[in-house]
Amino acid sequence: MHCSLLPLYQVIQVPCKDAQDVEAGQKIIELMHELAMPMTHRQLDLCGGGLSPALLLKMIRWADLWDAPECLGLCAECLMNFVHTLLHITDINGILALPDAVLHSPSFSKGLLDLCSKGLLHKFGNVHEVISKEELRVCFTRLAFPAVKLFLSFDELAVHSENDVAVLCAFWYDGKVCDEKELKELSELLRVARLSPSFRADMLPRLNFFLPPSLPVLTLFNLVWDHESEVALEDKGLLKDCPPGWFAPARSGVVPGGADVLDVRFEASKLSALLQAAKASQDTSPLASPSLYYCGYFWVLKVCLLQVAGPLELELSADLSICPSVPPLPAPSALKARYSVHHVPLHGPVVSWSCSESWFKAGTGVVLNPRFLQFVGADGLTIECQLAVLI
């Protein structure tokens, strides 16, 4: 009796989330088949195949699931060669969510983390700009916790002060749920010593994400930090319970020139309505600018028409103040800042309006002395406010 032995095949069903997941699994099977061939018959060209980071990430997960280290290595190397400027937020989140065996392996750890770091710095390195532009700010809030943790470790962030980093973290955490361990990790990466004194004492304890080792530790820090040198504090051991990250050097990135200037433009149509109301002897309400961000606070400039001095000349007063509250930020109590206000006509030299320093309280502005300004109908009115937070 003759009996032929037929090979036995085991069918394994694996769940797939979407069509791309299926494609990734198929490509890994094809790659495994290719790698099983003799070297002379292989035609490997992953990086030249136009594979997206999203597809490569799924391929890495399949390779890890099927214990195919050579496939995994090829996919990881291809991913590391990807251009960081083309990474999407989901790509960065996906890389940092890879299994520990991949993300922390000696072969891939540095390359993958460098790729994510470059992508994050390219998109969000100018922290002032990210906060000021709603589109960028919303994009930043889509980062997963590991990406934000990596971001906070960067020395190269461009900020006016560490206030900017704290504010961006508050926007990121708004509406999210993190466990206590994650909040402590974020709080320990904030460079508390580089916050402005008023922000550190007033705003920081009330920020939604900030979780110090204890309130007394932060209170002691605020009491002694601005009155003793770092060497003296280390010798005395007064701040030994504070996280080391609090004392890290200031960020080294440079905010592009002009970012400390709030550029306010009042449209000609609104000024014309103000003039018409004045001519009709009606009460004229001040014109208010949109809220503008600088160094941990949102500011607003209001102008009020006092009188029409001539066909092309207005007497205006102005009020510069910090916004009472911009969710999710708490309302600031007070800060001291230097300001310089100028009128920038469309034609002709810049006209200085006021230059001084003052304490600001939420909702209570500094009233600038009345000023006669030339106004040409179609030009509108452009005012520049240059700021520097002192305390």
Image: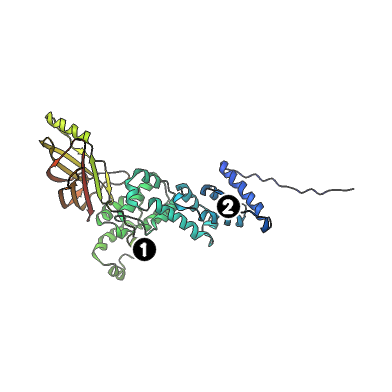
Query: On the image, numbered disc 2 is attached to which residue?
Result: 46
In this rendering, position of residue 339 left or right of residue 256: left
Residue at 34% from the left image edge and 52% from the top image edge: 127
Rendered image: mark on residue 283: none
Q: Is residue 227 visible?
A: yes
Few, some or many residues within 10 Å of mark 2 (<14, 14–19, 20+): some
User: Does residue 314 appear left or right of residue 144 in this picture?
Assistant: left
Residue, far top: 280
Q: CA distance from mark 1 to mark 2?
A: 43 Å
Say if mark 1 contacts mark 2, CB within 8 Å.
no
Mark 1 falls on what kind of element? Answer: helix
Q: Residues within 10 Å of mark 1 (few under 14, many from 20)?
A: few
**Residue 334 visible in the displayed image:** no
Three-letter code, disc 1:
Pro
Q: Residue at x 26, y 55 (%)?
A: 201
Q: Secondary structure at mark 2?
A: loop
Give the image location of residue 248, x and y in percent. 34, 62
Which badge, 1 or 2, is on the more N-terminal residue?
2
Residue of label 1: 244
Q: Residue furthest left?
A: 309
Q: Horizontal and vertical percent for residue 126? A: 35, 52
In which quarter of the view is residue 72 placed?
A: bottom right
| Kind of residue indicated by mark 2 | Leu
